[in-house]
Amino acid sequence: MSFLSPSLLSADFYNLSKQLDILAENEIKYLHLDVMDGNFVPNISFGPGIIKSLRENYDFIFDTHLMITSPEKYIENFKDAGCDIVTIHYEATKHPLRVLQQIREMGMKAGISLNPGTPVEVLDYLWDELDLILIMTVNPGFGGQSFIESQVKKIKRVRELINENNPNILLEIDGGVKTTNIEKLLDLDIDLFVSGSDVFNKDLDAMQAKLDKYKEILKEENIGK
Ligand code: DX5
Ligand code: ZN
């Protein structure tokens, strides 16, 4: 079963509640929250304060993607903000295993993300502390980039490894996912598809039409609760 996790990064922040209300009305289950620090990636987005104010108003599973250096310093802030899943980058900390443990100890689900140039072998020895693996299908930092085809091989290998090590771990991909290319990704057994620029639209009717298209492709019962 595959779910859509729309990325807030591409939202029109002036009309944020209108856009999130559309997601809620469509019973979208996950909301992908891209946190960027201008250090790990060359862009700055938003932090726990904004996430907390969203938490007070929406029931989505908060699928938080930390593109920040030394995430261990801020895990408690994201717990306080009401995050459900916290995914760190393997490349962003000297102690990925310790940070995954820290996330779980605080009662959240722990994810690890791999940049396109990072090999799957780094997942070894992390298996016991993982709830989710996020494969970047663009270089992290910006919405609206093109899907990097070389990552398909990596996604297939990670699915095999998940099945061997712990089938409960969710497999998520992020970057360049659109209604025009998602169909060829459906047989890769991906649990969560992040999509930002393809989902959010200032034209709310167009946004609804796009959600209808995703529902059709992912099967209506799988896109929402
Ligand atoms: C990129 C972010 C993505 C981004 C995806 O660093 O992690 O979540 O918002 O945007 P699209 O779907 O436009 O590629
Ligand atoms: Zn992301």
Image (cartoon, helix red, strand yellow):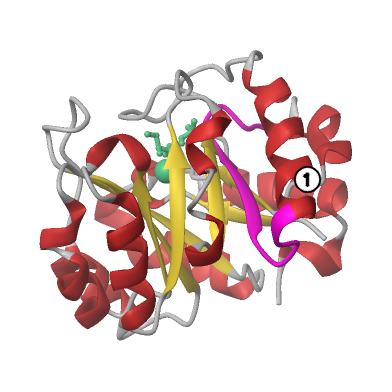
Q: Nearer the viewer, residue 117 or 146?
A: 117
Q: Nearer the viewer, residue 102 or 67?
A: 102
Q: Percent position (x, y) of residue 105? A: 33, 81
Three-letter amino acid code at the position of disc 1:
Lys
Q: Secondary structure at mark 1?
A: helix
**Which quadrant of the render holds ligand 2?**
top left
Point out the image quarter for the N terminus: bottom right
Q: Percent position (x, y) of residue 97? A: 35, 56
State whether residue 197 appears in this view: no
Residue situated furthest front in the rendering: 125
Residue at 56% in and 27% down = 176
Q: Percent position (x, y) of residue 131? A: 55, 65
State whether residue 213 appears in this view: yes
Point out the image quarter for the C terminus: bottom right
Direction from residue 192 to residue 45 in the image, left or right: left
Q: Which residue is mark 1?
A: 213
Is 77 one of the magenta-colored residues? no
Residue at 22% in and 29% down = 41
Residue at 36% in and 29% down = 140
Above or below, 25 relative to 59: above
Q: Percent position (x, y) of residue 159? A: 75, 43
Neighbours of disc 1 within 10 Å: few (<14), some (14-19), many (20+):
some
**Magenta residues, start to end:** 165-178
Is 168 one of the magenta-colored residues? yes
Q: Residue 179: name its quadrant.
A: top right
Q: Residue 152: name its quadrant.
A: top right
Q: Nearer the viewer, residue 110 or 206?
A: 110
Q: Nearer the viewer, residue 48 or 93?
A: 93
- Number of dots carrying numbers: 1
